[in-house]
Every structure is written in structure tokens, then in C-alpha cells.
Image: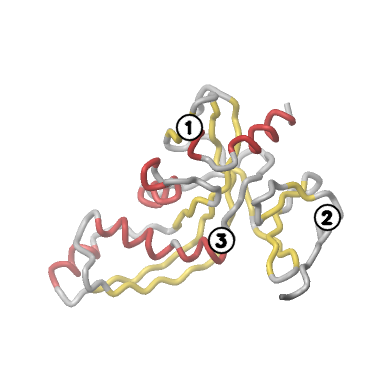
């Protein structure tokens, strides 16, 4: 067994204190708003942005992390008819992958998958704290192909599909949610998620409340 690596939670850019929850893999600097992922015994800077609410709701405004990965996909089937059908699908420019811990996403609905299906285009808003990222960038990329297949499967049988996809830039967005005490509703599409579905809701709420 190798020797554990211990890194001080200090921003490698400005020296400020990095903030995060116990299960986080990306840490946020309160001083310069930088985002840093722990990768191979060192911090790697990640591009981040806070999304502007498009559909304001009641409740406390908070932000949860969602990866946006620029993607180009090429589809094909041996069956010419299905090949024609799938080519009519509008290819999403961005594939979104939920970066916070949501248990039983199949039951509650995966925000990243829904954002991808709806071709959401997030717009920058005011700076805000961003905690709760439990999914690394490389792990998020694993979900790109399954998201695309899930969306295509709702239109056409994907048996024997030939799918080639490439990924480009990635942005960790802080998506606005409104916490009313029972559920969280996102400020983009109005999707409702039970607060109990978030594994770290207690720790997140303690952080949010502490910043009032």
C-alpha cells in the first residue's frame, strides 16, 4: 500500500483556503473563485461558471454542480431506415452530467440527462459558492455516451448502433436551485428533486445557512 498523499487545502493560484464537503473531489476558493480537482496527488484547475436563473422560484437560492462537456457524435446503423431516422435527431452541443451525489437518479430524474435532452444552454450569472462536487471530470465523461444512447433510444431502437463521440472543453456549472425545505427546484427548467434524494443535503444546508 502506498503512502497517503496529504495536501493542504490552499488554492494553488492565490493561496486562499479551499472549501469543500467530506466527499468532494473539487474544491472552491472563496478568494479567487477558482475550482480545483485533486488529480494524481496534485490540484488541477477546472473551468467553472455560475448559471443565471431563467425561472426564479420561491425558497433559498443555492447552487449545485453539473458538468457540461462539449460533444460531437457520429451515429450509424446497418439498417438504412433507422440510420435515416436517427440522423434527424438534433445532436446536443453539450452533454450535461450531474456532478453532485443523487441517489436513485432513475427514480428522481437525472438533471444532467434531462438538461442534455432539452438542449439547455446555460448563461453566466452572478458569482456564488459551489460545493458538493462528488463526480470527477474523467468519471463524468464516462456518462456522455450512455446519455446520448438513452436519448436516441427514446426515438429509435438502438440495437446494433454504431456511435462514435468525441469530447472537448468541459465546464463545471453551478446550476441554481431553490430550496423550500422539502424539495429543490432548479431555476432553469423547473425540475423538482426531493431534498432527501441528495446524499449530502444536511452538510450542504449547514454550509448554505452558515453563509446567511
* 1 or 2: tag closer to the N-terminus: 2
Q: Please indicate, yes or no, whether residue 59 appears anywhere in the rendered image.
A: yes
Question: Dot 2: within a 10 Å radius of its alpha carbon, few (fewer than 14), some, or many (20 or more) residues?
Answer: some
**In the image, 195: left or right of 128?**
left
* Dot 3 crowding, Cα within 10 Å, few <14, some 14–19, many 20+: many
Separation of residues labelled 3 and 1 (CA atoms) = 24 Å
Residue 54 visible somewhere in the drawing: no
Q: Nearer the viewer, mark 2 or mark 3?
A: 2
Q: Position of residue 59 (x, y in %)?
A: 55, 23
Circle 2 residue: 10
Determine the CA span between mark 2 and mark 3: 23 Å
- Give the image quarter of residue 42: bottom right
Taking the spot 65% from the left edge, 51% from the top edge, the residue there is 23
- The residue lying at 54 percent from left, 24 percent from top is 181
Q: Which residue is mark 1?
A: 185
> Residue at position x 74%, y 48% from top?
33
Residue 92 picture location, percent across and down: 38, 57
Dividing the picture into quadrants, the one containing residue 136 is bottom right
Q: Is residue 142 left or right of residue 25?
A: left
Q: Is residue 173 left or right of residue 189?
A: right
Question: Is residue 57 shown above or below 139?
Answer: above
SS for callout 2:
loop
User: Which label sits in the foreground, 3 or 1?
Assistant: 1
In this view, which residue lies farthest toward the right? 15
Q: Position of residue 182 (x, y in %)?
A: 50, 26
Q: Are marks 3 and 1 in contact (CB under 8 Å)?
A: no
- Along the polypeptide, which appears first: circle 3 or circle 1? 3
Kind of element beneath mark 1: strand
Q: CA distance from mark 1 to mark 2?
A: 33 Å
In which quadrant will I find the N terminus? bottom right
The residue tagged 3 is 170
Amino acid at each position: 500500500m502506498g503512502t497517503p498523499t496529504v495536501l493542504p487545502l490552499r488554492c494553488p493560484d492565490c493561496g486562499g483556503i479551499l472549501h469543500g464537503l467530506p466527499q468532494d473531489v473539487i474544491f472552491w476558493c472563496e478568494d479567487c473563485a477558482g475550482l480545483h480537482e485533486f488529480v494524481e496527488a496534485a490540484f488541477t484547475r477546472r473551468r467553472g461558471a455560475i448559471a443565471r436563473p431563467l425561472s426564479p422560484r420561491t425558497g433559498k437560492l443555492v447552487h449545485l454542480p453539473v458538468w457540461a462537456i462539449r460533444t460531437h457524435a457520429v451515429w450509424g446503423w446497418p439498417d438504412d431506415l433507422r440510420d435515416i431516422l436517427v440522423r434527424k435527431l438534433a445532436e446536443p452541443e453539450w452533454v450535461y452530467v450531474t456532478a453532485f451525489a443523487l441517489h436513485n437518479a432513475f427514480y428522481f430524474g437525472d438533471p444532467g440527462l434531462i438538461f442534455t435532452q432539452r438542449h439547455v444552454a446555460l448563461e453566466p450569472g452572478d458569482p456564488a459558492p459551489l460545493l458538493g462536487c462528488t463526480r470527477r471530470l474523467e468519471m463524468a465523461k464516462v456518462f456522455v455516451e450512455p446519455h446520448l444512447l438513452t436519448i436516441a433510444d427514446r426515438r429509435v431502437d438502438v440495437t446494433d448502433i454504431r456511435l462514435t463521440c468525441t469530447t472537448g472543453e468541459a465546464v463545471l456549472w453551478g446550476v441554481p436551485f431553490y430550496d423550500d425545505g422539502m424539495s429543490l427546484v432548479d431555476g432553469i427548467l423547473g425540475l423538482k428533486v426531493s431534498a432527501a434524494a441528495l446524499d449530502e443535503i444536511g452538510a450542504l444546508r449547514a454550509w448554505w445557512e452558515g453563509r446567511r
